[in-house]
């Protein structure tokens, strides 16, 4: 007796949907990687206007080594708040001018800005080089 055997199909994976998914993932990662970097590469503007101050009372300066000065007196960063409060009380002025070397970090600038605000400064100006 002879039995009719059904044809045995070999298992296989359909590649068309797999290729579609790979191309979709490729497009997704190509598009999303463009959003990681800034869209426009630009140089920040330099100030053209420079106000000439007649009398400078409180100037906080940071040199390239990270040393902090109030006017011409060197001050430890931990003592800066107390020194600024003392000088503001004596002068009756609460505005601070910041002069920093171009090589100091943005974090150092923000830290000094916070210290000046905590000391009671109502105005914080940044000195810049117009010729640059």
Image (cartoon, grey):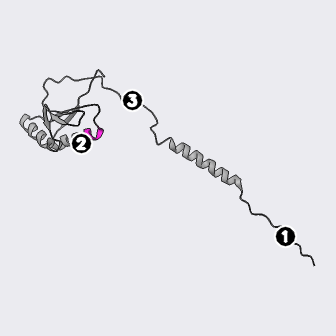
Which residue in the rendered view is the most extreme toward the left? 90
List x then y, in percent, for residue 50: 24, 23
| Label 2 secondary element | helix
Q: Which residues are magenta?
A: 105-109
Mark 3 / mark 1, whichever is N-terminal: 1
Which residue corresponds to mark 2?
A: 111
List x then y, in percent, for residue 65: 23, 35
Which residue corresponds to mark 3?
A: 43
**How many residues crowd around disc 2 within 10 Å: few (fewer than 14), some, or many (20 or more)?**
few
Is-magenta flag for residue 54? Answer: no
- Overall secondary structure of the magenta stretch? helix
Q: Which mark is residue 6?
A: 1
| Label 3 secondary element | loop
Is residue 120 depicted above or below 72 in this figure?
below
Residue at 67% across / 50% down in the picture? Answer: 19
Is-magenta flag for residue 108? Answer: yes
Q: Give 62 or 56, whichever is nearer the viewer.
A: 62
List x then y, in percent, for residue 117: 19, 41
Mark 2 / mark 3, whichever is N-terminal: 3
């Amino acid at each position: 007796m002879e039995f009719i055997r059904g044809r045995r199909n070999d298992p296989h994976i359909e590649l068309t949907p797999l290729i579609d998914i790979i191309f979709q993932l490729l497009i997704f990662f190509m598009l999303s990687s463009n959003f990681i970097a800034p869209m426009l590469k630009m140089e920040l503007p330099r100030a053209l206007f420079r106000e000439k101050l007649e009398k400078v009372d409180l100037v906080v300066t940071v040199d390239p080594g990270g040393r902090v000065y109030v006017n011409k007196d060197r001050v430890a960063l931990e003592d800066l708040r107390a020194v600024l409060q003392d000088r503001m009380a004596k002068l009756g002025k609460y505005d601070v001018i910041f002069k920093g070397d171009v090589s100091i970090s943005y974090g150092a600038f923000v830290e000094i800005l916070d210290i000046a605000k905590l000391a009671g400064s109502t105005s914080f100006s940044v000195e810049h080089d117009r010729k640059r």
